Image: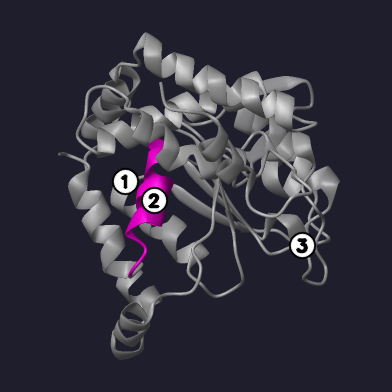
Amino acid sequence: MPIRPVIDQVSSVILGKDEEIRLALACMLGRGHLLIEDLPGVGKTTLAHALAISLGLDFRRIQFTSDMLPADLIGVSVYNSGGFEFHPGPIFSNLILADEINRTTPKTQSALLEAMEEGQVTVEGKTRPLPDPFFVIATQNPLEQYGTFPLPESQLDRFAMRISLGYPDMEAERDLLLGRPRREMLSGLARAIESEELLLIFGKVRQVHASAALLDYVQALIGYSRSAFSNGLSPRAGLALLSMARAWAYLEGREMILPEDVRAVLPGVVDHRLYSAKEGAPSEMLLAEVPIP
């Protein structure tokens, strides 16, 4: 499989997190944006950087702070002797790492909305397209930490998936302690796939077949969420679930989606979109209550 070298290379840097790496990669192959929520220091930034290098994508890291302005993200027009000249901001890259996105104000957070949804930004009335492909990987600290601003539901819904890395297991942590620094390892990584191959993979993922029975299962999950939760899954969420399942099936070497592909990506797609007063993740309820056709 052409994408295998990418998985292997990223796994050599992010140890013991094979499933999380595959979920992040599935999100990108499904043309979605990814939110990684976890404590500082568990490898969120390193994962994004390793993916960018391995996929051969132009990469920019943006450190979000409380005093950051939308112009710092998008860019500004500066007057010179010949008139106004637009100076593009860091958002004009293939892969943006929006680091600690919930440490900046809602005004700056909202500057990402058009870019994530439309693949373009509007500056002073002029629409400017972003590079293709364009991905946002945002990292977020837990909301109970000091100095964070919760992302609004409209912003959360733009992220196809949310994942967490968590602490490494004992074996992986021992390897981390004994091995080279991760930053040093990043500097030694190289592109693991050519641009033409990546474009072909995007096309193959879109061609992964979804049967009528599989679509019935996806619709049953969506329908149950709308009856069991006050804010059920939106049509955008349903499309994201199908796209992520297609990408996961491709990573598993299949040309059609199986129910287990949907179930593998379901927590990452729905848990940041649904809210429940009951214990347990919303996805656990969906998986338990909606039978596989």
Residue annotated with mark 2: 52
Work out whether 180 lies above or below 28.
Answer: below
Check residue 23 for magenta coloring.
yes
Task: Give the residue displayed 80% in from the left and 42% down from the top.
Answer: 152
Residue type (three-letter) at the residue carrying disc 1? Leu
Q: Main secondary structure of the magenta part?
A: helix
Residue at the extreme left of the image, as rendered: 1
- Marks 2/3: CA–CA distance: 27 Å
Check residue 156 for magenta coloring.
no
Task: Give the residue displayed 42% in from the left and 75% down from the top.
Answer: 168
- The image quadrant where one finds the C terminus is top left
In the rendered structure, find residue 55 and report the number of the disc placed on it. Answer: 1
Work out whether 102 lies above or below 267.
Answer: below
Relative to 181, 191 lies left or right:
left
Quadrant position of residue 126: top right
Relative to 221, 103 lies left or right:
right
Quadrant position of residue 197: top left
Q: Position of residue 264 (x, y in %)?
A: 41, 41
Residue type (three-letter) at the residue carrying disc 2? Ala
Q: Position of residue 194 (x, y in %)?
A: 22, 39
Residue annotated with mark 3: 143
Relative to 38, 242 lies left or right:
left
